[in-house]
Image (cartoon, helix red, strand yellow):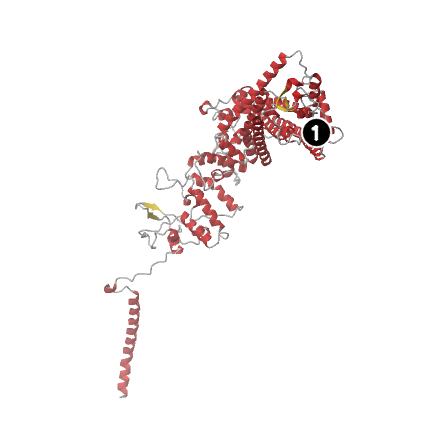
Amino acid sequence: MTKLFADRKTITAPVRKLKAWTLAAVVCLASVVTALPATAQDAKPAAPAAAKLDNATCQGCHDGKKGKLEGQDAKGEKRELHSIPTDKYGKSVHSTMQCVDCHTDIVDAKAQHEKAAQPKKVDCIACHEQLWEKAKKDNLTKEKARLGLVVQNIDAYKKSFHARPNKEDPTKVYATCNDCHDVHTFDVAPAGTTRRAEAKKENPKMCGTCHEDQLEEYTGSVHGKEVFEKNNVKAAVCADCHTSHAVANTSADPTKLAITASCGNCHEDNYQSYKKTYHGQVMSLGYANTGKCFDCHGSHGIVKVDDPESKVHPDNRLKTCKQCHTPKKGLHEATPGFVTFEPHGTTDDFKKYPEIWLASKFMIGLLVGTFAFFWTHTLLWFYREYKDRKERKLRPHVNVEAMPEEFRGKHYQRFSATWRIAHLTFALSLMILTLTGMPLFFPDSVWAPIIIENLGGPKIAGLIHRTAATVFGAVFFWHLFYVFVRVARNWRNFKIFGSDSLIPNLQDGKDIIAMFKWFIGIAPRPVFDRWTYWEKFDYWAPFWGVTIIGVSGLMMWFPHLTASFLPGWVFNVAMIFHGEEAILAVVFLFTVHFFNNHFRPDKFPLDTVMFTGTFTLEEFRHEHRVEYDRLVRTGELKKFLVDAPSRPMQLRSKILGFVLIAAGLSLLAMVVTGFLGH
């Protein structure tokens, strides 16, 4: 038995060892089998879970690290796909959005995407407008003000040239948001930062992707060299002139005016001096039919004035002027004097523009001196007459009882019909000249463009202005002829300094002194002959005014003739003389002249003598005591007495007088507001 167990033990050991190896082999085999593919019967693999369409998945292929990616366009043709750098997209304004928020046609993450049958069309405009509407609905417009600005830019873009259908392919527009902004990397750098400035420098290159010729021209310009060679971020780029979103057709007048105004953002002094020229005045009124900055300097290829290639180089300037001043455009051809015209001449630089400086200072002195004297005279006169009336100091009356019966109810004939017609024509033509001329002198005033527009534009207004000037001049020269004939007929009895003469004399000086003594209450009111010193001033002022305004106006009316004999700076001087003298005439007439004849207490509210030609003997004696006494003494008064004007005549005279006064005061208000705004 012992042997038997010993034998079994001897036999069992190898068996156990065999079983152990067998078990280990089975375990290993099971492990291997588990790792191997299924049997032929179970060979079909289980479907993997669908990949998420998040940004990480998209950038797994579109991050630019796998080389070029190709896709298919709507026609099935191959096209290269964009690579979107992860870091740049992460800093963009759209970094919090999912790719499929915009690429709504993508429905899987396969290499060649299956496209949705009818994807929802999403574009920049619709998305931003919806976001802004939601912000308004949620009362978050202040917190999301940037969205509001974007929508404003969208509105501007919709009206822009870029949003129009492309002529070559009407299914597309000229430029979309992505063409300029690159929606995957677009980031708005804070204003004033270096990054913002650097982004501005890239503007010409971006525009140049479509506008290649313009970019080439710009690169060689003074602006382009400042940007590309000198790294000057303040120099003008495309968006400074054309704007970023409201890019308009450059052949349209509003665009021309906007581009001209944009020059003033950098060249402020030159722009302001330009606006004081006729070209600039018309431009300021909203019309583009005169010379503008780019007409003279060029547009994309502007170079410095001393560059021989510059359009405004002295050697090229006449040719540049002839671009507009040519018979082809209805103007006389520019002549040599145009070359020395100063389009940027100022009145405060004697060294550079001595003629303009002298003309300006002379006219300022004339205006200040004239108004200082006559406004002081007016105020003192008003004070004295008002005080006398308040103290019930009535003016002296004619003793009716002592007057012959035939004189009672009669009027003194002071002005003939010829004088009255000439005065009315003078007044109307001067008012028309003011209405048509002052809008040019104050083009930035609110009323100026309204008046010019209602007159039919600068060309029609100019025609009306020159017609009125011709009438004004004709009346003036007719008057000279009339006076000459009258003096010639009676030259034996005519006295240069006589009572009928309007030539100032020594007595006028004495009357002025006596008048000021009366103003301050140290002497009685002086008495006057046929013509007072202020009437003589009113008479002679037009001689000066017509000479200054007329000559300067003719020079500008016929610039080709003027510039054939005179240097161009005379136009600058003519502009100063013409405008300043016009202001002197208008303000003087509608303040001092109106006061002397209508507004002083003794005359208020209206004196009709210039409309009826007559006034009462009482008024005659009060206003011209010396003449009255002389005519009574010599018995000649009877020759000048006429019947009082009829009631209809008086009524018509009052209506006409009030209409003219109202028109004059309206023009005065226009000029004053224009001057204060200027």
Q: Is residue 350 visible?
A: no
Quadrant position of residue 409: top right
- In the current view of this chain or complex, which residue is farthest to the left? 41
- Say which of 559 and 190 sits in front: 559
Q: Position of residue 444 (x, y in %)?
A: 54, 35
Residue type beneath disc 1: Arg
Task: Look at the numbered disc 1 and give the secondary structure of its residue.
Answer: loop
The reply to whether residue 103 is in sight is yes
Quarter placement of the N terminus: bottom left
User: Is residue 96 shown left or right of residue 553?
Assistant: left
| Residue projecting furthest to the right | 522
Location of residue 574 in the rendering, given as x and y in whole percent from the top left corner: 58, 25
Residue 658 quadrant: top right
Residue positioned most to the bottom:
1
Q: Position of residue 309 (x, y in %)?
A: 49, 28
User: Which sits in the foreground, 321 or 91?
Assistant: 321
Vertical comparison of 465 with 156: above or below? above
Q: Nearer the viewer, residue 276 or 369?
A: 369
Indicate the quadrant containing the C terminus: top left, top right, bottom left or bottom right.
top right
Q: Which residue is mark 1?
A: 395
Q: Is residue 221 above or below residue 61?
A: above
Which one is in front, 319 or 480? 480
Q: Dot 1: within a 10 Å radius of its alpha carbon, few (fewer than 14), some, or many (20 or more) residues?
A: few
The answer to whether residue 394 is left or right of residue 172 is right
